[in-house]
Image (cartoon, grey):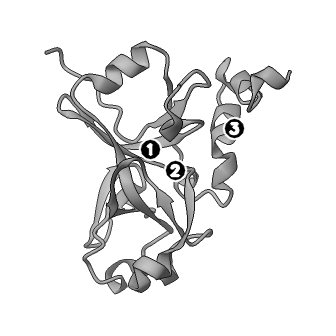
Amino acid sequence: MTEVSSLTGRLLVASPALADPNFDRAVVLLIDHDDEGSLGVVLNRPTPVGVRDILLPWAGLAGDPDVVFQGGPVSLDSALGVAVIPGDEGPLGWRRVHGAIGLVDLEAPPELLAAALGSLRIFAGYSGWGPGQLEEELESGAWYVVESEPGDVSSPEPESLWRAVLRRQRSKLAMIATYPDDPSLN
């Protein structure tokens, strides 16, 4: 197998042609990407479930909206915490993924991280791809790969993140942000 260039920390932005309803207009932060597969969380799928309803100790640290996000279709009964922590060193209970973005150990006492957290999102489930699967989807044009920004993790308007991420691109991708929700209505 050929070596995979890591996309860890990058965003996958669903192309309008992506047919999987789990990823319609999804923005996925890749937390891990190597020759063994890929794992990420969908940043723009808030649920009506409050963080305090499932992880009360972390509720006061969750960003706005303080709800659980559906990270993807895999293992919806598990939770992942993603936080932005500025600076070079992160606290105990946090593992850097890319830049200021990292994973939170939700088993750790929240007090360990409270002072350092810039923002926190809780995700139920995740998005996963087996070896070579994501590369095939990229080759078929299902996803656009773009750089992430720390603010993507904590966007106060997650429903508009797909358009916002595309709009900030300095390429023809910015035009795709104007793609209608239902092209048949044009």
| Mark 2 or 1, nearer chain start | 1
Most distant residue in the left direction = 1
Most distant residue in the right direction = 186
Q: Can residue 176 be seen in the rendering of this structure? A: yes
Position of residue 165 measured from the top left corner of the image (x, y, whole percent): 63, 38
- Helix, strand or loop at mark 1: strand
Q: Residue at x 78, y 21 (%)?
A: 184
Give the residue type at disc 1: Leu
* Above or below, 178 relative to 30: above
Residue 16 appears left or right of 177: left
State the mark number for residue 43: 2
Residue 115 position by quadrant: bottom left
* Above or below, 139 relative to 104: above
Position of residue 21 measured from the top left corner of the image (x, y, whole percent): 53, 36
Q: Check disc 1 and report the residue beneath it.
A: 29
Front in this rendered view, residue 126 or 88? 126
Residues at circles 2 and 1 in contact by the CB criterion of under 8 Å: yes
Residue 178 position by quadrant: top right
* Above or below, 185 relative to 104: above
Please identify the quadrant where the C terminus is shown.
top right
Give the residue type at disc 2: Leu
* Above or below, 185 relative to 64: above
- Helix, strand or loop at mark 2: loop
Give the residue type at disc 3: Arg
Dot 1, how many residues are within 10 Å of its Cα: few (below 14), some (14-19), or many (20+)?
many
Residues at circles 3 and 1 in contact by the CB criterion of under 8 Å: no
Q: Residue at x 33, y 50 (%)?
A: 97
- Helix, strand or loop at mark 3: helix
State the mark number for residue 163: 3
Disc 2 to disc 3, C-alpha distance: 13 Å
